[in-house]
Image (tube, rainbow, N blue to C red):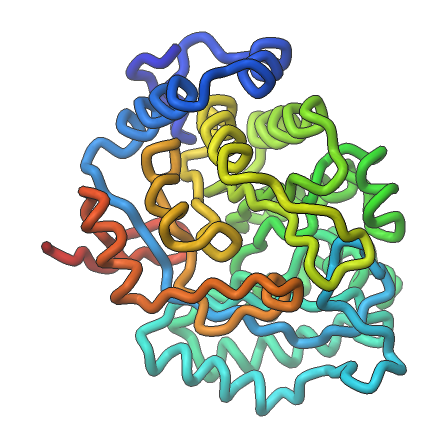
Amino acid sequence: MTTNNSDGKGSVNKVRIERVAALYLLLNGDLLTLGKSANEIRQQLHPAGIVTFVVDRNVNYTNICDSKCSFCAFYRTKDAQDAYVLPSEQIYAKIAELVDQGGTQLLMQGGLNPELKIVFFEELFREIKKRFPMVQNHSLSPAEITCIATNSDLSLDETLLRLKNAGLDSIPGGGAEILVDEIRSSISPKKIGWKQWGEVMLKAAKLGMPTTATMMFGSCEKPEDIVEHLFRVREMQDNGGSFTAFIPWTYQPGNTELGGTTATGVDYLKVLALSRIVLDNIPNIQASWVTQGAKMGSVALFFGANDLGGTMLEENVVAAAGCSFCMSQQEMITLIQRAGFIAAQRNTTYSIIREFPV
């Protein structure tokens, strides 16, 4: 399945797996066999045995959201008692705490708030860049950027360029959920479709902005939808995408309108391994310890993951659904080392800042 070969984006597959074979593996593949294949790919892409993490903070600047996704426990209507837009000074204080702890990445995400236009973000991002030039502003999602464009009567191109000029460095892959409109219309009917999500990411890539891609699974999608999502991400990357990493995570049903149950650990590991096998042009696969916990995060390192994401000084969206795993920087380093890997702090674009010897 895998031989040494590189296309500059991390590909190691001479013969690419296609949809029918991927679906067969997801439905019928043996868990340990899938894990072995994914682990071999990880070893070829990252032969030094390094597992990375970033010191970051999620700052949810508003919880007011018109999208009202049924899987989300975080959003509020504007007239809710606990609805908010964070004052700028409070945002700066949160970033200062991040910097004090050696953090390098700011992830600002919020609801689709119709009252926040481009000028709000330009002023905020310029001041952040002025005060904290060492921090990578890895913020907003395609849905948020589309919302800002609509609120401001701007095109996507104008919006992205203005945000970039104001200090937006890169774009996280939030709001992808499942990139199949049948599923999106069921769980988030007011959110942009999958083609619009991809359009934002490809336009950002043309501006030289790094991006990531995510997948939330375990809500109401079919196995075929999971496979389609993976291939649509792979095809976007083939067509000029700038995805540095892929992050699959499981739907958390607590306190949501959608309800239901979450995917099992076995489901998570199978999808994670399949992601590593299918996405031969994306160099990094991130384990979702935030939804799976530290122990499963450790296991994920043998199922294709080479990165544990952020230490997350703050996380509110997943926590709102009752899932609140926490891990300090030292706990993350210890977890990586006990799994037999070299722990390393990275920046947003996966350059190593420092390694931690055993």
Locate residue 191, reporting x and y percent.
Answer: 83, 51
Q: Quadrant of the N terminus?
A: top left
Left or right side of 208 for 32? left
Residue 317, relative to residue 83: is it above or below?
above
Instruction: Give the total of numbered labels.
Output: 0
Q: Quadrant of the C terminus?
A: bottom left
Residue in view at x 31 percent, y 22 percent: 40
Q: Quadrant of residue 164?
A: bottom right
Regarding residue 30, the answer to whether it shows in the image is yes
Query: Which residue extends farthest bottom?
Result: 89
Q: Nearer the viewer, residue 73 or 275?
A: 73
Residue in view at x 62 percent, y 48 percent: 204
Residue 30, relative to residue 50: is it above or below?
above
Q: Quadrant of residue 4?
A: top left
Q: Quadrant of residue 253?
A: bottom right
Residue in view at x 33 percent, y 27 percent: 39
Locate residue 211, reporting x and y percent.
Answer: 54, 48
Residue 21, relative to residue 171: is it above or below?
above
Query: Which residue extends farthest left?
Result: 358
Locate residue 306, reporting x and y percent.
Answer: 34, 41
Left or right side of 231 for 32? left
Locate residue 151, reporting x and y percent.
Answer: 86, 66
Regarding residue 7, the answer to whether it shows in the image is no
Residue 52, relative to residue 226: is it above or below?
below
Residue in view at x 86 percent, y 74 percent: 77
